Amino acid sequence: MSVEVANETEWQLDPKVFSELGLWVMHQMRVSTQSELTITFVDPEPIAELHERWMDLQGPTDVMSFPMDELRPGDERNEPEGMLGDIVICPWVAQQQAQAAGHSTMEEMMLLTIHGVLHLLGYDHHTREQERQMFGLQRQLLLTFFALHHGTAWSATLPSGSVNELEVYERKYGTNRELGH
């Protein structure tokens, strides 16, 4: 099982944290150790382009998932294997959501990583019941991961003097965003 993490932003974050989280969630969901996952952190403009191209929604979003082999969670007898897919996360949108939720940007990006993996495994939140199930599972997974790593200090920071890329995007294209993933 491999998780590749690419950071195409100015954000300073430890890719090992996201790799470990991705591997752990895949293991919890009983996905084969032969499966692969890619997590990429991007600025607002690239994720807005993906958002419009694949979802026909305008503006940057927090996370997008692109399944490859359409794997589903396994069980005691069957652990599917293959290419799980790609997750794309925008730290700038995550930062905005984290501020609104009252937690750190790092926690938000970890939540979005789990959210993305669950989407890759076929979970969705179109109905209230689906939302209850998916959001409950992602919360349980995140809190369990935090409990297993009690006392670990994770952070995602920007270098001093960094330009807020979300503000740049909004000045260029406006603040009209359609969230939905």
Image: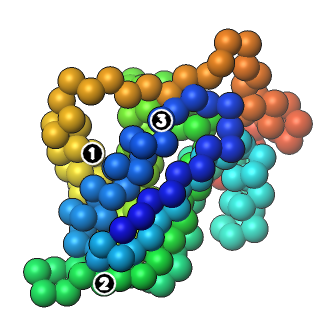
Q: Which residue is mark 2?
A: 80
Circle 3 residue: 14
Query: Relative to residue 116, is residue 107 depicted above or below?
Result: above
Residue bearing the label numbered 1: 142
Q: Is there a contact, CB below 8 Å, between mark 2 and mark 1?
A: no
Residue closest to the eye, 55 or 154: 154
Measured from the top left, where is residue 178 in percent x and y? 66, 52
Question: Which residue reaches farthest right?
Answer: 172
Q: CA distance from mark 1 to mark 3?
A: 17 Å
Q: Is residue 112 above or below residue 165?
A: below
In screen coordinates, is 36 left or right of 165? left
Binning the other alpha carbons within 10 Å of mark 1 as few (below 14), some (14 to 19) or many (20 upward) gives many
Farthest left residue?
76
Task: Give the amino acid type for the residue marked by disc 3 in the picture.
Answer: Asp
The answer to whether residue 47 is left or right of residue 76 is right
Quadrant position of residue 72:
bottom left
| Sequence-first tag of 2 and 3 | 3
Query: Which comes sooner in the sequence, label 1 or label 3?
Result: 3
Q: Residue 3, position in %: x, y?
A: 44, 59
Label 2 to label 3: alpha-carbon separation: 28 Å
Q: Quadrant of the N terminus?
A: bottom left
Scheme of colours in the image: rainbow
Question: Which of the 4 quarters of the picture holds residue 84?
Answer: bottom left
Q: Residue at x 16, y 80 (%)?
A: 75
